[in-house]
Image (tube, helix red, strand yellow):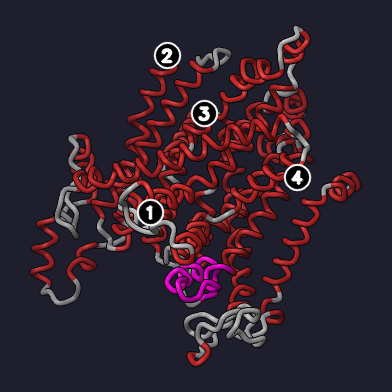
Amino acid sequence: MRRLLRTLSKTKAALLSLVVLFFFCIMAISASALAPRDPYQIALEKRLIPPAWVSGGTSEHLLGTDSLGRDILSRVVYGARISIVVGLSAVSISSCLGVMLGMVAGYYGRGIDKVLMRLADIQLAFPSIILYIAVMAILGSGLLHIIMVLGITGWVAYGRLVRGQVISYREKEFVEAARAMGATNLRIMTHHIFPNITAPIIIIATTSVAGNILAEASLSFLGLGVPPSVPSWGSMLAEGREYMRIAWWLPVFPGLAIMLVVLAINIVGDWLRDYLDPRLKL
Amino acid sequence: MLQYIGQRLMQLPLVLLGISALTFGLMFISGDPTAMIMGTNWTPEEIAQFRHELGFDRLWPVQYLDFVGSAVHGDLGDSLRQHRPVLELIAERLPATIQLGTAALLISVTLAIPVGVLSATRRNTIYDTVSRLGALLGQSLPDFWLGLMLILAFGVYLRWLPVSGRGGLTHVILPAVTMSAYFLARNMRLVRSSLLEILGQDYITTARAKGLPGWAVLYKHALRNALIPVVTIIGLQVGRLLGGAVIVETIFAWPGVGRLVFQAISSKDIPVVQGCVITMAMSCVFFNLVVDVAYSFIDPQIRYG
């Protein structure tokens, strides 16, 4: 832990990114306290007010208002909730599923391995966004549906990685020793192999959070994510697209928020990879 | 090698069958499309007649086998909305998607290699820092947002470039740049890291010790090997490129397969969705196979077996 903090203090970009992520997490958790206005409150007489620093803007609405007069800053603050909830929940589901299936495939091999890896091949043959769009079009929009779709389809990356790692570990001496001492297969997998393969799983999980946030925003942008009334960065961008010729601020701010979060996660992911696997540091 | 290619070819029908089953299954569980197509102003008899005409009243295994059988013969059915063969619709839109994808790949490769090489050879300089930051930014930019910002800047304010539809060369610039941003960033990082790894190897030190000039070491010895993983990754990017096409083509009203599939999903035009998804998935499988096999030719150290 001390080494982790020491290397972190030397990597300014990663430290700054962690601060940014912390800020967005706080924003998501205490959105109701931080947002200056009700993000759902419609005020047609205040529609399309530009940001405060542009002529015609008002300090009442720092980032301006949308086509229904809703405060953009408040909607961006609430939007963090959707992005962070989707990003973390989907990663939790896909990592659990992928690690479990990858362990079973790698440890037991044979038929089960072949079936699972062919399933992975089939899924990888689909461009992921097409798969998301097709499934969301069937299930209908909704936060839970997005989390389930991203969570379940995300297993492949973990599954393939864990399978490869387990194969390389299952014949090692310490595993043989545990087996000779009468440890069950489940115990060998969870207590002896798993602790050795957590580093690459953490790296994939970090970058997957960014991928899931982008996927949620893409689906919401296409009208297949959360319902348009719910403040989500993707759906705000979709609305902004319609009005951007007369109100540039509509698509700019939610997009900036997505970019900042994803950039921060990518930088932290890079730093984690360098820290956990120094051989990759170049 | 031949054994490996044979093995991969043997697996191909299984993967294709899986793709068709998944596509068919997804569309099947979406419910009865007749209700969506016909609306509410029809009698139950008329709906039953319509279902019978389209074959939706048959058992699903029969519908699936019929679907696979026809697909094998190149018949992907007719569009429920446009009343034209799906294959014809896809063939009509495919050139636009290929044009856009090729332009995006060309932009990303022609820029990523020189920028990556310069970044690696000038490691830890301001140039390296800026290009690495640029690459990180490129990987973090949502393509739909980048597209909107480019439309805003070059279409709405500067009025330099057209922002929708397919026409002359100018029409392809904005969508291709939008689509290439991610790949440019990723390929640049890959070229940089791959070249740095190679430059640290013993045979490069030997080449330098022999007195070879720096450019000869870089281009004749290092870069050739450093580009091997890049070639592989570029081949594997076809899937993401096709996925990205859905969003980019929708934003720029580009008449390609991506936009066709999105419109078909929105209007529940099942045969078109199935046809497009199968075409895209098959393209991915095909390119992955080609890359896998080509990899062993490019890198003689790799032997499959």
The residue under label 1 is: B249
- Judge whether residue B237 is colored magenta: no
Q: Is residue B167 left or right of residue B202?
A: left
Mark 1 falls within which chain? B
**Mark 1 in CB contact with mark 3 (< 8 angstroms):** no
Q: Is residue B17 visible?
A: yes
Q: Separation of disc 1 and disc 3 at Cα?
A: 26 Å
Q: Amino acid at mark 1?
A: Glu
The residue under label 3 is: B232
Instruction: Provide the residue span drawn in magenta.
Output: A230-252
**Disc 4 with disc 2 on a shared chain:** no
Assign a secondary structure to mark 2. helix
- Residue at (23, 42) in percent of width and height: B91
Q: Nearer the viewer, mark 2 or mark 3?
A: 3
The residue under label 2 is: B3
Q: Nearer the viewer, mark 4 or mark 2?
A: 4
Assign a secondary structure to mark 1. helix
